[in-house]
Image (cartoon, rainbow, N blue to C red):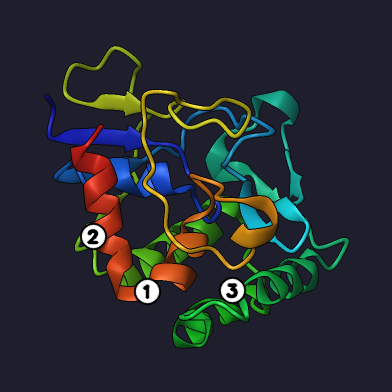
Amino acid sequence: MSSKAVFSTAYLAPIEYFATLIKYQEIFVEQGEHYVKQTYRNRCLIYTANGLFPLSIPVKKVNGNHTKVKDVEISYFENWQRHHWRSIVSAYNQSPFFLYYRDDLEGFYSRQFKYLLDFNTQLIKVLLDALGLEKELAIPEKYIENNDPDYLDLRNQFDPKKKNANVRFPKYIQVFAEKHGFIPNLSIIDLLFNEGPNALGYLTEVCSNN
């Protein structure tokens, strides 16, 4: 197995994304691929009082369907930052570790980034630090070809519209589980806010069992 893996960019990526990331020594986030809509590149799934709830960052594709990820801009026509942060607070303010990690994340919902890739990359780095995962993210200057034998291509591995039946996610306590049951593979913040320092152990378990 290659020690290098190339991932797509992702907004508050799902648990599977981070559990997979653990396996590789060198992590690359692709900037040269064409942007694919309705993926984790600009959306995440959280657990609210009403159940599963998607959050999506509005974007501007400056070159239409041929826009590369590095050129995708964030739209601030609507105040999505306020909406997202209020949704996150409403969903997780009763979770055991929300206050512990709140300050790490809140600033991302007041500062405006021009490019989606920059926003996501900085956010992933903060999350890696919060998880205690000592991994470095690299942005390759050139597009990594699909058949490059030096890299495992995971750019299309994670899809919010498809469930990977081969991955098992042990249950952990979620705020609204009594109403809606356990929902697996949500945004990494669901695990972080509910499990805190135990989140890394959970990711390692998911990684080792799949």
Q: Is residue 114 visible?
A: no
Tell me where residue 34 appears, x and y as whole percent. Answer: 57, 27
Between marks 3 and 1, how big is the CA–CA gap? Answer: 20 Å
Residue closer to the observer: 30 or 89:
89
Disc 3 + disc 2, Cβ < 8 Å: no
Q: Earlier in the sequence, mark 2 or mark 1?
A: 1
Identify the secondary structure beneath mark 3: helix
Q: What residue sits 18% from the left and 16% below the top? A: 149
Q: Which residue is mark 3?
A: 108
Tell me where residue 198 appears, x and y as whole percent. Answer: 29, 68
Disc 2 + disc 1, Cβ < 8 Å: no
Tell me where residue 26 appears, x and y as whole percent. Answer: 18, 44
Q: Earlier in the sequence, mark 3 or mark 1?
A: 3
Tell which tag, 3 or 1, sits nearer the viewer: 1
Amino acid at pointer 2: Gly
Tell which tag, 3 or 2, sits nearer the viewer: 2
Crowding around mark 2 (Cα neighbors within 10 Å: few <14, some 14 to 19, many 20+) is few
Q: Quadrant of residue 23?
A: top left
Q: Is residue 100 visible?
A: yes
Q: Which residue is mark 2?
A: 201
Amino acid at pointer 3: Phe
Q: What residue sits 23% from the left and 48% below the top? A: 205
Identify the secondary structure beneath mark 2: helix
Q: What residue sits 46% from the left and 80% below the top? A: 97
All told, the count of numbered labels is: 3
Q: Which residue is mark 1?
A: 196
The answer to whether 12 is drawn above or below residue 42 in the figure is: below
Between marks 2 and 1, how big is the CA–CA gap? Answer: 10 Å
Between marks 3 and 2, how big is the CA–CA gap? Answer: 26 Å
